[in-house]
């Protein structure tokens, strides 16, 4: 049995600059009871925006002052201090950020227990230093061929309608992550090794 319940692109120790968002696509449309349970259990810093679309697509996001919300929501480990960056912005202690990342993964598991999750996505914030990807993310990238029959129509519809939806944003982000992963793991041209 697989140790990961569903693909989570962007899983790992994420760093954040101003804000955070997580996209979730469910296997089917959750019932109103399931939606309420999923929304109410969402980590507090991500409850500034809770937006359902297309029946089974959910995006949750923080406001622009994520680190202040993290400082209010999660205790810091002893000796781990909040700080002001060189840019003058307030940054929550690293242990607070780690607790937030853990809370996101726990919440996704809870959501999956209520309604099966097809996939989740958290983009990398390059302004903050990106994400130290976990094995869950690495495994998720290997699942992309299995997900493509579901994802291709989302992209095709966005091209046909010229509209960007939460689902489109998620799929484009996933594809970008997969390309970067492929670039890191691809053999040098002419080496004779198979391409990823």
Image: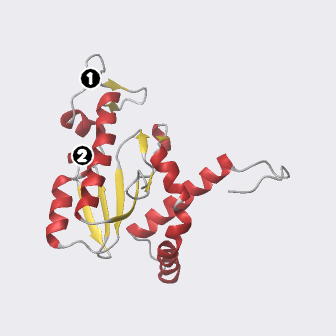
Which numbered dot is residue 77?
A: 1
How many labels were placed on the picture? 2
Give coordinates of residue 156: x percent, y percent: 52, 79
Q: In the rendered view, would you say 150 is above or below 180?
A: below
Which numbered dot is residue 146?
A: none
Give coordinates of residue 151: x percent, y percent: 49, 72
Query: How does the figure colour the protein chain or chains?
Result: secondary structure
Question: Is residue 40 among what the camera can see?
Answer: yes
Give coordinates of residue 177: x percent, y percent: 54, 54
The residue that disc 2 covers is: 45
Front of the two marks 2 and 1: 1
Residue drawn at (18%, 53%) of the image: 41
Question: Is residue 124 among what the camera can see?
Answer: no
Tell me if 37 is positioned left or right of 15 in this view: left
The N terminus - image quarter? bottom left
Q: In the rendered view, would you say 123 is above or below 51?
A: above
Give coordinates of residue 193: x percent, y percent: 78, 52
Determine whether the residue tagged by mark 2 lies in a helix, strand or loop. Answer: helix
The C terminus - image quarter? bottom right
Label 2: few (<14), some or many (≥20) within 10 Å? many
Residue drawn at (65%, 46%) of the image: 184
Q: Which mark sits nearer the N-terminus, 2 or 1?
A: 2
Furthest-front residue in view? 1
Determine whether the residue tagged by mark 1 lies in a helix, strand or loop. Answer: loop
Label 1: few (<14), some or many (≥20) within 10 Å? few
């Amino acid at each position: 049995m697989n140790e990961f319940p569903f693909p989570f692109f962007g899983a790992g120790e994420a760093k954040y600059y101003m804000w955070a968002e997580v996209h979730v696509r469910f296997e089917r449309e959750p019932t109103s009871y399931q939606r309420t349970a999923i929304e109410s259990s969402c980590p507090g810093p991500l409850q500034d925006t809770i937006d359902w679309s297309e029946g089974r697509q959910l995006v949750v996001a923080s406001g622009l002052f994520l680190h202040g919300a993290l400082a209010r929501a999660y205790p810091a480990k002893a000796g781990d201090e909040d700080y002001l960056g060189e840019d003058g912005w307030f940054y929550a202690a690293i242990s607070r950020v780690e607790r937030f990342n853990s809370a996101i993964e726990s919440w996704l598991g809870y959501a999956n227990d209520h309604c099966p999750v097809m996939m989740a996505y958290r983009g990398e914030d390059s302004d903050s230093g990106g994400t130290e990807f976990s094995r869950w993310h690495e495994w998720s990238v290997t699942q992309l061929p299995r997900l493509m029959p579901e994802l291709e129509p989302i992209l095709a519809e966005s091209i046909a309608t010229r509209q960007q939806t939460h689902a489109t944003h998620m799929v484009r982000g996933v594809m970008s992550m997969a390309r970067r992963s492929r670039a890191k793991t691809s053999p040098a041209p002419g080496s004779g090794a198979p391409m990823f």
